[in-house]
């Protein structure tokens, strides 16, 4: 704790120093009687977080907020106390971090997705909030050994999935690399120990080689009369681990365990040194990258090349200016660290413009899971740099298409896109782009909007979200109709009516999970693909199986045209219907299922939909009619090499048995096989089995089965 006082005196003066010393005393007193899991005083933690931020060069308000970031949540201190002592700016930061600290990450996907959304909302309000949270997470990861193994792995997974990528997107490589290494230590301890041990064994040999390379490059600088600094930088363990896994290589096959960095004064000197290094050593084809001309999305700039020495040893060299080096190491934090070159606020706005774009997306993505998937896709995607005709660089995920490019320019360009040119030639919209391509989008004011087929080949999560947003807003009525129809059909297949499945009570439960305000909004989401039918219907069915009160069993009554043929609990005359999902016929073992408003629906006992049915709603059922006395419908699924063979086999077999086809539908599966669903009116289970045998005997028939789901 003394070290932070030394840093406060070293880096801050006047009123800023006085405020930080007061914040130190205030936080120390507030946390006086609290302990960490390690048994150490709790105050060690806010001091460590503040030190990390001082090293990153953050301003005094941020350091004060770091010292105070847990006082509102964990002590009796109120927001008004912080406002009175330290002002509105510090309170805003402390309150922002406190709201993030209230997030409890749970195993449920929906919970984690909502937390992810909250993080980005906090970032949009003040980027310093997430920088404090990153420092907080870094210190917690450093002291993770005091927690249980389960909690260690849970926190490490959250950190690797969310916080490390955010640190990378903000350009704070120091924090990103350390977080990733700490995550590896707990998620794959055996691999971590292997890397530590084996890399250390060869450290002396590698250092001799790096010293040789550094000396040679220093000679190039002296000959060119360029003032610069050359040094070796070991790659962090996680980057080596990823390369071994992704490229299926052993540690001995990873040659760039250490990179050599060259820091010079100007951009011209970067290119001059770059050329002279290539004159001295042969570059490896495909391993030259110019991030000065085309910076990464996080504003990283540098020249990268991998060269081979005269005795065959390859190594990586990075060349950049001092200012580029600051950005590479500190990212967004460089805005505060280097006060002599303080960026204009407009430049800072450019650096965090991507966060505003994320927040624009989240306005159209009510479902938090969809929001999380969209943003993660942008955080994790590999880089592909392409150009507009005006030479503007656009960064896209690997494998991106002209449609991804169009939406990266603007939503309206994507929505009005009708074609594309790549390097001056018209290409299909699903063409995979390559780094360096010049892309021109052809638009039409008469375009009716994006095609749903685009969702099959686009790679950018933001383009996917924008297309879905278009269908959500522009085709709302059609989406509601389509979604309702899809859910109604899914309910029918399970022997239920939509009206009994979607009730105020069941909808309330679904809306708690999927964040719908009205049933129409739910139908619309199904219609435009934000959620699947199964996501919704399984939650509705789960409600009826676990929570819905069992309906009153209908009393026997006489109805002029009531469907009969079975007894329920030994009684006749009840309102009975037969489930379309399994189509029971005389001879099948059956069971009755009590519904709301439709009486009793009879299922086969082996029907999958009865597997998890509420036992209180199941009734004993038996056939009243004998086989051959009444006609019933049975559904059969036929798989064949082509539809002609299927139709020929079905029609011939049905005609031979003097039966009647009541419905027939055909389609093809992903393997190209023809699938034909046919419903036949017949007298008994024996008829079903005979018909299946006759159809199966025909040529080109791959499979025949009775529909059971």
Image: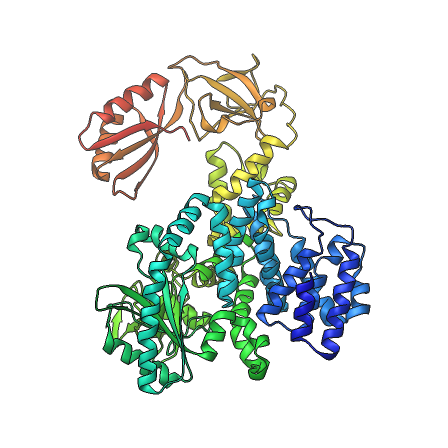
Q: Residue at x 28, y 73 (%)?
A: 422
Give the vertical position of 221 relative to 56 (above or below): below
Which residue is farthest left? 699
Q: How many marks?
A: 0
Say whether residue 494 is left or right of residue 137: left
Q: Residue at x 29, y 44 (%)?
A: 670
| Residue 634 location (% of width, % of height) | 38, 26
| Residue 87 location (% of width, % of height) | 77, 71
Q: How is the image coloured?
A: rainbow
Closer to the camera in the image, 364 or 630:
364
Closer to the camera in the image, 333 or 35:
35
Say whether residue 171 is left or right of residue 639: right
Whether residue 479 can be seen here: no
Closer to the camera in the image, 323 or 611:
323
Q: Residue at x 50, y 37 (%)?
A: 491
Closer to the camera in the image, 650 or 226:
226
Q: Quadrant of residue 628?
A: top left
Image quadrant holding the C terminus, namely top left
| Residue 531 location (% of width, % of height) | 49, 49
Which residue is farthest bottom? 225
Say whether residue 299 is left or right of residue 363: left
| Residue 266 location (% of width, % of height) | 41, 85
Q: Quadrant of residue 403?
A: bottom left
Say whether residue 71 is left or right of residue 204: right
Image quadrant holding the N terminus, namely bottom right
Give the vertical position of 397 relative to 627 (above or below): below
Q: Residue at x 71, y 53 (%)?
A: 42
Whether residue 335 can be seen here: yes
């Amino acid at each position: 704790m003394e070290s932070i006082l030394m840093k406060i005196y070293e880096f801050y003066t006047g009123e800023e120093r006085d405020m930080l010393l007061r914040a130190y005393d205030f936080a120390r007193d507030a946390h006086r009687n609290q302990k960490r899991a390690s048994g150490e005083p709790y105050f060690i933690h806010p001091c460590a977080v503040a030190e990390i931020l001082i090293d990153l060069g953050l301003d005094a308000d941020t350091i004060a907020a770091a010292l105070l970031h847990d006082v509102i949540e964990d002590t009796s201190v109120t927001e008004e106390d912080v406002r009175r002592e330290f002002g509105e700016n510090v309170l805003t930061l402390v309150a922002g971090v406190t709201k993030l600290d209230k997030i409890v990450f749970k195993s449920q996907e929906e919970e984690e997705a909502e937390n992810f959304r909250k993080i980005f909302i906090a970032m949009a309000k003040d980027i310093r909030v997430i920088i404090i949270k990153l420092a907080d997470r870094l210190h917690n990861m450093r002291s993770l050994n005091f927690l249980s193994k389960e909690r260690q792995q849970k926190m490490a997974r959250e950190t690797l999935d969310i916080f490390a990528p955010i640190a990378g997107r903000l350009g704070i490589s120091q924090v990103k690399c350390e977080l990733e290494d700490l995550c590896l230590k707990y998620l794959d301890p055996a691999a971590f120990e292997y890397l530590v041990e084996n890399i250390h064994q060869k450290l002396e040999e590698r250092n001799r080689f790096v010293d040789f390379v550094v000396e040679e490059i220093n000679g190039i600088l002296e000959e060119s009369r360029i003032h610069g600094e050359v040094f070796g930088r070991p790659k962090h363990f996680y980057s080596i681990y990823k390369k071994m896994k992704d490229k299926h290589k052993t540690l001995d096959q990873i040659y760039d365990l250490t990179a050599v960095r060259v820091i010079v004064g100007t951009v011209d000197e970067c290119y001059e040194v770059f050329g002279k290094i290539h004159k001295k050593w042969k570059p490896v084809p495909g391993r030259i990258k110019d991030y000065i001309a085309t910076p990464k999305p996080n504003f990283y700039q540098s020249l990268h090349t991998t060269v081979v020495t005269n005795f065959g040893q390859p190594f990586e060299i990075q060349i950049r200016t001092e200012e580029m080096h600051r950005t590479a190491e500190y990212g967004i934090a460089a805005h505060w660290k280097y006060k002599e070159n303080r960026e204009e606020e407009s430049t800072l706005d450019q650096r965090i413009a991507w966060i505003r774009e994320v927040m624009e997306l989240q306005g159209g993505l009510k479902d938090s899971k969809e929001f999380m998937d969209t943003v993660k896709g942008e955080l994790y995607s590999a880089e592909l740099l392409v150009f507009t005709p005006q030479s503007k660089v656009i960064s896209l995920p690997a494998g991106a298409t002209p449609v991804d490019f169009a939406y990266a320019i603007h939503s309206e360009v994507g929505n009005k896109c009708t074609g594309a040119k790549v390097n001056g030639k018209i290409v299909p919209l699903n063409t995979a782009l390559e780094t360096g391509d010049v892309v021109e989008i052809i638009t039409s004011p008469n375009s009716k909007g994006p095609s749903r087929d685009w969702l099959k080949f686009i790679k950018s999560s933001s383009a996917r979200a924008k297309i879905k947003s278009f269908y959500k807003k522009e085709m709302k009525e059609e989406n509601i109709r389509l979604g309702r129809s899809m859910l109604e059909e899914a309910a029918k297949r399970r022997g239920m009516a939509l009206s009994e499945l979607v009730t105020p009570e069941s909808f309330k439960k679904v809306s708690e999970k999927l964040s719908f305000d009205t049933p129409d909004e739910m139908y619309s989401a199904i219609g435009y693909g934000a959620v699947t039918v199964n996501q919704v219907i399984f939650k509705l069915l789960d409600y009826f199986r676990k929570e819905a009160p069992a309906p009153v069993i209908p009393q026997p009554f006489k109805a002029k045209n009531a469907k009969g043929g079975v007894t329920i609990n030994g009684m006749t005359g009840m309102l009975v219907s037969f489930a379309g999902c399994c189509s029971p016929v005389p001879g099948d073992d059956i069971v009755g299922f009590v519904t709301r408003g439709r009486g009793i629906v009879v299922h086969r006992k082996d029907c999958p939909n009865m597997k998890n049915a509420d036992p209180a709603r199941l009734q004993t059922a038996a056939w009243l009619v004998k086989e051959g006395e009444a006609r019933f419908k049975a559904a059969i699924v036929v798989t064949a090499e082509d539809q002609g063979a299927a139709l020929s086999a079905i029609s011939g077999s049905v005609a031979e048995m003097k039966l009647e086809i009541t419905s027939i539908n055909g389609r093809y599966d992903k393997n190209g096989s023809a699938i034909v669903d046919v419903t036949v009116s017949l007298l008994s289970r024996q008829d079903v089995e005979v018909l299946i045998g006759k159809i199966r005997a025909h040529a080109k028939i791959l499979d025949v089965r009775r529909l059971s789901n």
